[in-house]
Structure formats: C-alpha cells, structure tokens
C-alpha cells in the first residue's frame, strides 16, 4: 500500500460489530491492506454508552463533539483535537454527550480479527 490521504467522506460507516449502541465505524486501512494497523472513522450518536475490554491498543482522536472514557482509574472527557489512548486489556466505558462524536482511530494490531 502506498501513502494515502483520507477524509470522512471516504469511509463507509456501518454499525460497530457486536454493539447495541448507535455507533458506526468505517475502516480505511486494515488487515486486508497488509499493514500492521487499522485506521478509520467512528460516529457515535448522542447519549450512547458502551462498555468493553480493549482487545488491541487503541488510539481515538475526537474530531467533533465530546465523549467520556471511564475506567477503574477515573474518567477523561475529550473534545475536538484531543486524543484518548486505551491500552490493550483495559475495560472502558465510552459515553457520548448531547452532541455525539465523530472520531478517527488507529489500532495495533487490527481490531476486527481480535474480536473474532
């Protein structure tokens, strides 16, 4: 795969696998492209919440809106331009605020095979 630039309009957002919350994700680079990471976009509807144990190292960049990520250690709230790092093995609860959120993400290694 050669260098590429992506925009949200390049992503096909589908409901996040295994989630009941109104959260959609769209991978732009993943295991099918031969690289070691997954990158993509996520859209979280307002007032959503999900709890999961992170199966790969995950970096989430908030582009629009706000969300909070809670662990046993505490809660961080992030808005546009802020980054949340969630290490493999951490149990997190991600909650959106009244405006929802648009994020970009990078995971190592690929998250889809790790969820299978």
Image (cartoon, grey):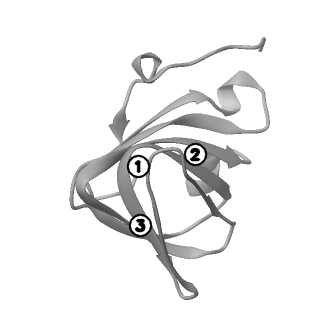
Residue 17, horizontal then vertical, whole percent: 40, 49
Nearer mark to the viewer, of 1 and 3: 3
| Left or right for 77, reference 15 | right
Mark 2 lies on a secondary structure that is helix
Label 1 and label 2: CA atoms lie apart by 9 Å
Residue receiving disc 3 = 68
Which residue is located at x 31 percent, y 66 percent? 49
Residue 116 visible in the picture:
no
Which label belongs to residue 112?
Answer: 2
Q: Quadrant of the N terminus?
A: top right
Mark 1 lies on a secondary structure that is loop
Label 1 and label 3: CA atoms lie apart by 21 Å
Residue 97 visible in the picture:
yes
Which quadrant of the structure image shows residue 53?
bottom right
Which residue is located at x 66 percent, y 47 percent? 107
Q: Are the residues at dot 1 and dot 2 in contact (C-beta closer than 8 Å)?
A: yes
Q: Is residue 66 above or below residue 112?
A: below
Mark 3 lies on a secondary structure that is strand
| Left or right for 35, reference 98 | right
Residue receiving disc 1 = 17
Residue 100, horizontal then vertical, whole percent: 27, 50
N-terminal of the pair, mark 1 or mark 3, is: 1
Residue 63, horizontal then vertical, whole percent: 45, 40
Nearer mark to the viewer, of 2 and 3: 3
């Amino acid at each position: 795969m050669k260098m590429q630039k992506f925009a949200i309009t390049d992503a096909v957002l589908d409901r996040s696998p295994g989630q009941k919350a109104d959260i959609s994700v769209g991978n732009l680079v993943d295991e099918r492209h031969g690289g070691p990471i997954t990158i993509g976009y996520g859209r979280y509807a307002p007032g959503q919440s999900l709890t999961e144990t992170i199966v790969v190292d995950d970096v989430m960049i908030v582009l629009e809106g706000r969300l909070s990520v809670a662990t046993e250690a505490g809660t961080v709230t992030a808005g546009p331009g802020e980054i949340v790092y969630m290490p493999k093995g951490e149990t997190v609860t991600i909650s959106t605020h009244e405006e929802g959120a648009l994020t970009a993400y990078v995971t190592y290694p690929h998250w889809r095979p790790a969820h299978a």
